[in-house]
Amino acid sequence: MDVNQKRNEINRRRVKYGFMMALFCALFWGIWYVPGTFIWNFDVVVDFQAAIDGTYDTLSNKAFLAAAILITGLNAAFVMLSYLIWNLYLGKAKFSEMKRSIVQLKACTKYYLLGAICGGPIAILGSFIAMGYIGGAFAAVAALAYPVIGTVLSSTWLGQKVSRRALAGILIIVIGSVTIYATGLIEELGNGGSLIGYIGGLMALCGWGIEGAVAAKGLDVSEPDVAITMRFGLETVIWWVIAIPALALMSIPVYEYAWKMISDPVILLSLVMLGLTFGFCYVTWYKSFPLIGVGRGQGIGSLYGIFAVIFLILFIGVDAAIGSELKGQVSLLVGAVLCTVGTLVMFTENSDNVVSLRDTGEDREGSP
Amino acid sequence: MMEGRPFKFRILEILSTESTWNSDLVRQLQAEYGMPSDYHRDCLNFDLIEVAASGMISEADAKIDVDGEFKKDSLLTLYRITPIGVDLLDELKAKVRRRSGE
């Protein structure tokens, strides 16, 4: 094998690895919707809301938001636990690199703090709010267009190149994913929904879109495993040092119910599932960005829509996941075909187009 | 200035002084950061691939490692810093947390 063949092979392998990471991200993200939907139905979560309102009859927005904050805080803590295990597996060198990186507040950590804010109190909380107020289908579909925001930001702010083919692939996947949920979405919107639920969906869409671009900026100067641990460490601090103590100061029995949740074996198992699925969804999401760029990484990541449907069908049945009507099943089939086409459009792009994700500036006058 | 700082900071600094083969660069990083194993070698080499993909460094030359001086039959790459890599390094130098005496 000559040098050119070897170079092309390495480049192809890098791009393939990046796409595989993004695909795993979509898979784990899709699975996450199963425990993420289930957790709202546990008695302890309903009891917590009733304890705030003093009644089970009509639960208030305050009680609902408090529950969403508690669930999101527990989700972050269990993701962080899964990262501690992951980094122990990767070895001592990762912890040393983390120590070196976290002290570089201006050069490095600020991007992960911003990522933690966009991802945690904006996107993930927004998604849980949308799940609880309107429904799982709306929550999933509301965020599906996030690669559009990520692609625009990564192109304008970071200067990442986005080929027409990649852009076409991203758009086909977004349209396909929206089609999958179309029937459920129309039904949920027809039931009225609520303004807070729509705001939650918008929070998820903007939060994840912006987080991708911010994270990519940070990933220019740090390793993905280190970056994601720092990002979730900071999100855990936001919930458990600021938001949850603030709820406790409002006389909401948040610690009591957090303990009740983790001491119940079934809820604990659900939290472990949330932590593992979301943790590895994020690891693979962050690993894909430096290899294939934010637009492609997020575009393939959007396939979580189709995986969410598959896993919801497996765990809660066809009727509960997509409805028993033929139009729901047809929209799922059409959406799945579109998603597959979009993925293939991106996956079969010539890897030469992805050698460098940016214009390097080497055509500048007097460049090194 | 970037010694003992995150790997990617140091990679940019080393390449800002001269173009360097990945084999030499990885060996230097392994020695500086106390990461002697082959696993660490491959991790650091992967960091180089990520930095190159981000456009901060680029390939100036390449050859096959026929003798196995780094990793037999692998591609040895001579990396150089790019103008946007120089810009990023300048930005990092301005933002990096100072140690006493710096």
Image (cartoon, rainbow, N blue to C red):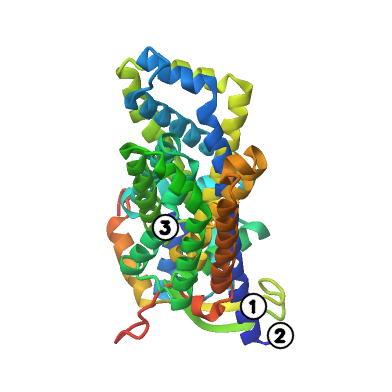
How far apart in space, not on screen, are marks 1 and 3 (Cα)?
A: 33 Å
The answer to whether one can see residue A113 in this image is no
Residue position for label 1: A9
B74 on left or right of A216: right
Residue type indicated by callout 3: Ala
For marks 3 and 2 on the same chain, the one whose residue lies earlier in the sequence: 2
Q: Residue furthest front?
A: A326
Q: Are marks 1 and 3 on the same chain?
A: yes
Question: Badge 3 is on which residue?
Answer: A145
Residue furthest left as drawn: B94
Between discs 1 and 3, the one toward the N terminus? 1
Image label count = 3
User: Which is in the foreground here, disc 1 or disc 3?
Assistant: 3
The residue located at (55%, 73%) in the rendering is A345
> Is the Cβ of the residue at disc 1 closer than 8 Å to that at disc 2?
yes
Residue A136 versus residue A57 in the image, above or below:
below
Nearest-to-viewer mark from 3 and 2: 3
Identify the residue shown where x is 48% and y is 66%: A296
- For the residue pair A281 and A35, the one nearer the viewer reads as A35
Q: Is residue B26 visible?
A: yes
- For mark 1, does the 10 Å Cα neighbourhood hold few (<14), some (14 to 19), or many (20 or more) residues? some
From the top left corner, tell me how far across and down residue A328 is, in percent: 56, 51
| First reached walking from the N terminus: tag 1 or tag 2 | 2
For badge 2, the amino acid type reads: Met
Query: In the rendered image, which residue does mark 2 sit on?
Result: A1
Crowding near the residue tagged with mark 3, few <14, some 14–19, many ≥20 C-alpha atoms within 10 Å: many
Q: Position of residue A282 (x, y in %)?
A: 51, 49
Q: Looking at the rendering, which quadrant does residue A67 occupy?
A: top left
Q: Which mark is residue B36?
A: none
